[in-house]
Amino acid sequence: MIVLGVDTAGGACSVALRCDGVTQSARQRTMPRGHAEALVPLILEVLAEAGLDPGRIDLYGVTIGPGAFTGLRVGLATVAGMALAQDRPIVGIGSFEAAAADALRRFPDARRVLVLLESRRAELFAGLFDAAAEAAGAPRAAGAPFAVAPDALAAMLPPGPLVLAGDAAERGAAALADAGQEPAGMAGGPADAALVAALAEARAGEAGRDPPSPYYMRAPDARPSRPGRRSGAILSDASR
């Protein structure tokens, strides 16, 4: 099976091509914005490196968030267009799930993983995962994700060691240090598209032809236009 994984949910644009269970080619650029210009060239690069054309892709995996509004839409729209053109299925992968899988890969003995994602506001988005209850290559969520102020994070966590993951892991580690706590490990940074592709392959039975919907921890920022201004809502990348 040939799987293309895409992540544009956070501060990077990441693409990976997985062939028969092995990552054949991958590209990642750190970038808080500009995903629309970077994504298609990166996809073409990984396909060229693997010597494949888009028609050979069997399955697409793409992160669905939480993430920046514009970045998420770029990834979802690009993957949806490619999949529609080739009549191929898509699996949506949550940003929490991808980060938890990365932590489990780096720390295979981890028992619990706390994923922390940037909200682009004061609070962090947090999700706790139980590594012992693994499902399709990733730890299973130990409850619903939540938004939390960094100085309140320590009080929200059960006792015991945990590994931090996600693009806000460093902020979380600093907050825990202020509370006298230290994580058992750190797996910070943006999602890895190679892991997105691997998770999509593991969940191929859930794939569908309809584009997956983005997942937001809060509604996108929007406000009605003022009189005399161009009609339509104004959307902000602060929405995640």
Image (spheres, rainbow, N blue to C red):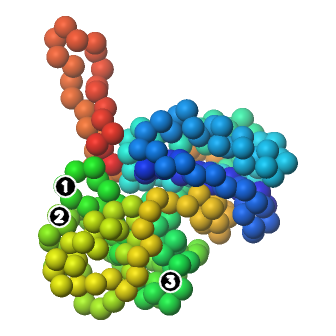
* Percent coordinates x, y for residue 199 in the rendering: 60, 66
Q: Is mark 2 on a helix, strand or loop?
A: loop
> SS at mark 1?
loop
Residue at horizontal 63 percent and vertical 37 percent from the top: 40
Q: What residue type is labelled 2?
A: Ala
**Residue lying at the far top of the rendered structure:** 228
For the point 55% across and 32% down, the residue is 37
Q: In this view, does 116 lie above or below 52?
A: below
Task: Indicate which disc residue 107 carries.
Answer: 3
User: As shown in the figure, which amino acid type bears the numbered disc 3?
Assistant: Phe
Question: How many marks can you see?
Answer: 3
In this picture, residue 51 sits left or right of residue 223: right
Of the numbered discs 2 and 1, the one sitting upstream in the chain is 1
- Label number found at residue 122: 1
Whole-percent x and y of residue 32?
A: 41, 44
Q: Which of marks 2 and 3 is nearer the N terminus?
A: 3
Q: Which of 81 and 41 is in front in this view?
A: 41
Real-space Cα separation, disc 2 to disc 1, in angstroms: 7 Å
Q: Quick check: marks 2 and 1 in contact, CB under 8 Å?
A: yes
Q: CA gap, disc 1 to disc 3?
A: 28 Å
Labels 1 & 3 near each other (Cβ < 8 A): no
Q: Name the residue under label 2.
A: 149
Which quarter of the figure is the N terminus placed in? bottom right
Q: How crowded is mark 3: few (under 14 residues within 10 Å), some or many (20 or more)?
A: some
